[in-house]
Amino acid sequence: MKKTTLVAPYDEPLARAAAVEARILGRSVAALSPGSAESRTSRKGRREEASEAEPFAAGPDAPSPEERPIPWNPPSFVSARTAVLEASVRFGSVDEAVLVVSPGSAPELFAKPAEIERALQDRTLSIVWLVRELLTHFAARPSAAGPGRLILVLADRGQSPRDPIASASFGAISAFAAALAESAADAPYEVWAVQDSCPQDDLTAQYIRRILQAPPERRPGRVLRFTGKSSLFNRP
């Protein structure tokens, strides 16, 4: 049966590149498109970047009509649950998930408290809620279907975040991903955490494709680091 790979957020260039690689493997792609997660300015910048880096808008690797993006409001746990449910209903199940986390821009430290609070909630809780729903879905899979696979990509692209707020959020999710990868050794699902220090998204997407193809017994239990030169199981 054809596998389904959930990819989020779909306005992130690396996520879109990973979606192309999943389609090359014959997967269906459930793409989550953010609605009102981050500030309009930061999201607009990423959308423009994604548009410029989207040579796969047409051609054999283009998404099929049934793969239209699924709306997702990142800071809402209800929206995360609804998005995963819609993906599983539309495609029959969700077998894998690729979540891309990048530092992005954030309010300054002396911005209004409400702006800082919103940015931290949007960037941090959005991943926590989505991971929670995905792992719940994977845990409920029948054993015959094999373990679900979650890939958390920490995409700093070799550039450490300079903004204090962006650093706080990215650091929190990085620690969260590392703890998940380590604690999932005996879980009925797989968690892979990748520290992406490669500035070329196409190379990172190909690396993600190799993880999607990895056999279930090759669980790393740690954070893998990808620089564009390392092998699949290199340590950070």
Image (cartoon, grey):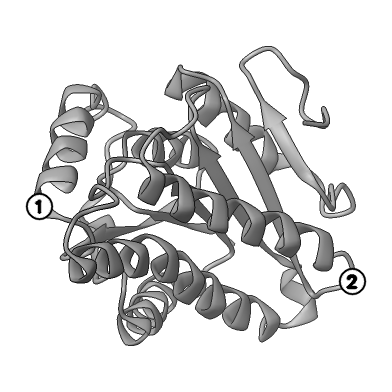
> Which residue bears the numbered disc 2?
186
Number of numbered labels in the structure image: 2
Tell me which amino acid carries mark 2: Asp
Percent position of residue 161, x then y: 43, 34
Q: Does residue 92 show up?
A: no
Left or right: 47 as drawn, with respect to 128: left
Percent position of residue 157, x then y: 48, 26
Percent position of residue 185, x then y: 87, 64
> Which residue bears the numbered disc 1?
40
Position of 29 relative to 199 (above/below): below
Q: Are circles 1 and 2 on residues that touch, CB within 8 Å?
A: no
Position of 42 relative to 120 (above/below): above
Percent position of residue 25, x then y: 55, 38
Give the structural element (helix, strand or loop) at label 2. loop
- Residue at the (32%, 34%) spot, across then down: 13
Of tags 1 and 2, the one toward the viewer is: 1
Tell me which amino acid carries mark 1: Arg
- Residue at the (65%, 41%) spot, across then down: 194
Mark 1 or mark 2: which comes first in sequence? 1
